[in-house]
């Protein structure tokens, strides 16, 4: 209730001349006369400006916007209406049936009709300045303005930024003034009706433009994965835009305009955003009806991880923007989607591991190269490692692999370390172990033991290389990579020993022992035959990694060529010493040391590889001819 002293203070500001004649004098006490005059002054001052903007009696007022036509007068209009409301409160308490109260009530109706029109016009005509992106980035614009001011080339951009910020601020201030006046005058329902109608359409239109549409479960089940993936990608963009601009900007605007009432702010934003938010965060639930089927392509897990990351990464924003109890259903739905996605992701990971274990393909990679299973699994794990942060949360609580099944010192994780990150490390290490065991079994498809080891070398090298060049390195650790790289070298050493050791063994161990010409001839023939067989068998082999390829070739060459060169130089003269020595040398000694070097340098090249090979030298051509 307003005090009489305050009432007198109000009338002191009502100095605008009125076109209405004063009422006839009453027989009142001096104090009553003063109070009556104050009330009269407030009513008439309000009447003067309200009637001037009466849309029913003034054609100019009907077609113009008061806040655009005369901003100072618009603000005075607001103040006079507020004074009128305070006066009505006094009159109601003293004489509810007075003519002045009746007149004040009629004036208030005219004023509210005017303000409804102004509120609607400002909301409608300033959509460009009130769009959520503009509102949500006002602070960013301010920062940009200060930074752009240092660069003359951005003067035009600076002017645009200043205009956007100033217009947006002014419009929001005007809306707030009108809203507070209407709510304070008992017209909150009318104000909210206009606001909700316009702003909800903007949210709904924004969601539609972001290509988020209501989709039935039945329709989703009939979609191909390619179409579904496109929809998921659109949804991911929609979440980003919605949380950073659409809903964020709308809440900022709503909080500003209806700052005076927490209840109204909650009701308003809830009604505006609920439908769009539920449509947005209900999408993952519908998708899961498609991805929950067994035998899903492995790549589906990455789209689900993207969706999980989009919600989890925006969780603080979701809780902040949809903080009201009346819209808690949005938070609940977002949480439900997270849980549903995590369950599907765990299921797909189990299916992925099971697929490795059950792989029964009998593909024999020519030349002992990298098996397609190794390539696909490591590609998959490398991509999964990029989601390690969310995988820690997703896999929390699900039973990890039994550590006792892992080889001792397989990787450096303490038995007492049961942190989520170490559990994730164990899971990745376990899947790789499953792969390596499967590759080991596939190696038996090669009948030659040396090529089995080359196959293991190539595949383990690919595993280590992919681990080292991806986030798997952070998960598995340098120690894991070092151990497996050493194991790969052991495989390579076994290959060299089994494949080329027999060739070296054809040469005498004791190089100084006396030998007859026949023994020398026999040694040369055994070496030539053994080298021909080895080269014929291993010329089709490949080593995919160029560094390991060169390393193996150099190692074989260093082991074989010097011994053969010494034997060739010291024992070749024995053949020449016999009758028709030159012919004997060519028929018995089929390879010069240079030939051996040329042939070895040409090993392990993948099909289609280019490069100049010294194997095209005359001696090499002669030797090749003898081997054909």
Image (tube, grey):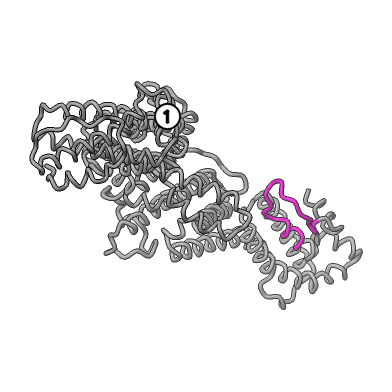
Along the horizontal axis of the image, is 180 left or right of 499? left
Along the horizontal axis of the image, is 306 left or right of 262? right
- Is residue 343 positioned above or below 313 on the image? above
Q: Is residue 588 magenta?
A: no
The residue carrying pointer 1 sits among few (fewer than 14), some (14 to 19) or many (20 or more) residues within 10 Å by Cα, namely: few
| Rendered image quadrant of residue 120 | top left
Q: Position of residue 66 (x, y in %)?
A: 40, 33
Q: Position of residue 23 (x, y in %)?
A: 19, 30
Residue at horizontal 64 percent and vertical 66 percent from the top: 555
Residue at horizontal 15 percent and vertical 32 percent from the top: 25
Along the horizontal axis of the image, is 83 left or right of 621? left
* Residue in the foreground of this view, choosing between 434 and 616: 434
Task: Please identify the dominant SS of the magenta region.
Answer: loop
Residue at horizontal 70 percent and vertical 51 percent from the top: 536
Q: Position of residue 414 (x, y in %)?
A: 31, 65
- Is residue 242 positioned above or below 159 on the image? above
Secondary element at image label 1: helix
Q: Which residues are magenta?
A: 597-615
Asked if residue 528 shows in the view, the reply is yes
Total numbered circles: 1
Residue at horizontal 56 percent and vertical 63 percent from the top: 493
Q: Residue furthest bottom?
A: 512
* Residue in the foreground of this view, choosing between 502 and 486: 486
* Residue in the foreground of this view, choosing between 155 and 326: 155
Residue at image mark 1: 205
- Is residue 65 positioned above or below 589 on the image? above
Q: Position of residue 29 (x, y in %)?
A: 8, 40
- Is residue 473 positioned above or below 43 on the image? below
């Amino acid at each position: 209730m307003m005090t009489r002293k305050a009432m007198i203070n109000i009338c002191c500001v009502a100095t605008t001349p009125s076109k209405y004649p004063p009422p006839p004098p009453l027989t009142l006490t001096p104090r009553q006369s003063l109070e009556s005059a104050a009330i009269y002054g407030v009513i008439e001052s309000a009447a003067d400006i309200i009637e001037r903007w009466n849309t029913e009696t003034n054609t100019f007022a009907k077609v113009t916007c008061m806040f655009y036509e005369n901003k100072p007068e618009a603000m005075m209009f607001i103040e006079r209406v507020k004074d009128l409301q305070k006066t009505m409160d006094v009159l109601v308490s003293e004489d509810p049936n007075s003519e002045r109260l009746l007149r004040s009530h009629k004036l208030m109706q005219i004023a509210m009709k005017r303000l409804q029109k102004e509120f609607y016009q400002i909301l409608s005509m300033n959509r460009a300045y009130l769009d959520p992106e503009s509102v949500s980035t006002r602070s960013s614009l301010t920062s940009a303005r200060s930074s752009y001011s240092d660069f003359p080339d951005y003067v035009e951009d600076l002017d645009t930024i200043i205009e956007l910020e100033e217009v947006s601020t002014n419009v929001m201030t005007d809306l707030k003034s009108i809203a507070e006046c209407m709510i304070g005058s008992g017209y909150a329902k009318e104000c909210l009706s206009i606001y909700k109608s316009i702003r909800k359409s903007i949210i709904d239109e924004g969601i539609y433009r972001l290509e988020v549409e209501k989709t039935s479960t039945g329709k989703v089940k009939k979609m191909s994965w390619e179409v579904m993936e496109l929809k998921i990608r659109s949804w991911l963009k929609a979440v980003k835009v919605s949380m950073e601009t659409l809903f964020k900007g709308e809440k900022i605007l709503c909080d500003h305009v209806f700052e005076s009432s927490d209840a109204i702010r909650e009701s308003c934003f809830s009604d505006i955003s609920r439908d769009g938010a539920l449509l947005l965060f209900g999408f993952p639930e519908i998708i899961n009806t498609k991805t929950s089927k067994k035998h899903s392509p492995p790549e589906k897990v990455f789209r689900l991880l993207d969706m999980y990351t989009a919600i989890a990464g925006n969780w603080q924003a979701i809780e902040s923007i949809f903080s009201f109890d009346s819209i808690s259903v949005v938070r609940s739905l977002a949480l439900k989607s997270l849980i549903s996605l995590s369950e599907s992701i765990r299921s797909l990971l189990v299916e992925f591991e099971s697929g490795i274990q059950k792989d029964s393909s009998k593909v024999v990679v020519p030349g002992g190269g990298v098996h397609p299973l190794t390539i696909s699994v490591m590609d998959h794990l490398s991509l999964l490692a990029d989601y390690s942060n969310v995988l820690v949360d997703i896999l929390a609580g699900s039973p990890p692999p039994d550590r006792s099944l892992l080889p001792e010192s397989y990787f450096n994780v303490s038995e007492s370390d049961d942190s989520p990150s170490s559990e994730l490390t164990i899971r990745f290490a376990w899947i790789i172990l499953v792969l390596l065991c499967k590759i080991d079994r596939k190696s038996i498809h090669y009948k030659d033991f040396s090529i089995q080891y080359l196959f293991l070398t190539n595949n383990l090298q690919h595993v280590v290389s992919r681990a080292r060049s991806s986030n798997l390195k952070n998960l598995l650790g340098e120690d894991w990579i070092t151990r497996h790289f050493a194991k790969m070298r052991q495989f390579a050493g076994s290959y060299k020993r089994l494949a080329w050791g027999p060739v070296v063994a054809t040469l005498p161990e004791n190089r100084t022992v006396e030998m007859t010409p026949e023994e020398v001839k026999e040694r040369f023939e055994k070496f030539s035959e053994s080298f021909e067989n080895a080269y014929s068998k291993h010329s089709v082999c490949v080593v995919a990694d160029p560094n390991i390829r060169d390393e193996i070739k150099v190692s074989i060459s260093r082991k074989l060529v010097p011994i053969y060169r010494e034997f060739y130089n010291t024992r070749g003269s024995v053949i020449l010493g016999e009758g028709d020595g030159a012919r004997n040398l060519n028929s018995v000694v089929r390879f010069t040391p240079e030939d051996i070097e040329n042939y070895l340098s040409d090993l392990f090249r993948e099909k289609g590889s280019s490069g100049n090979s010294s194997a095209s030298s005359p001696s090499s051509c002669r030797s090749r001819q003898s081997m054909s």
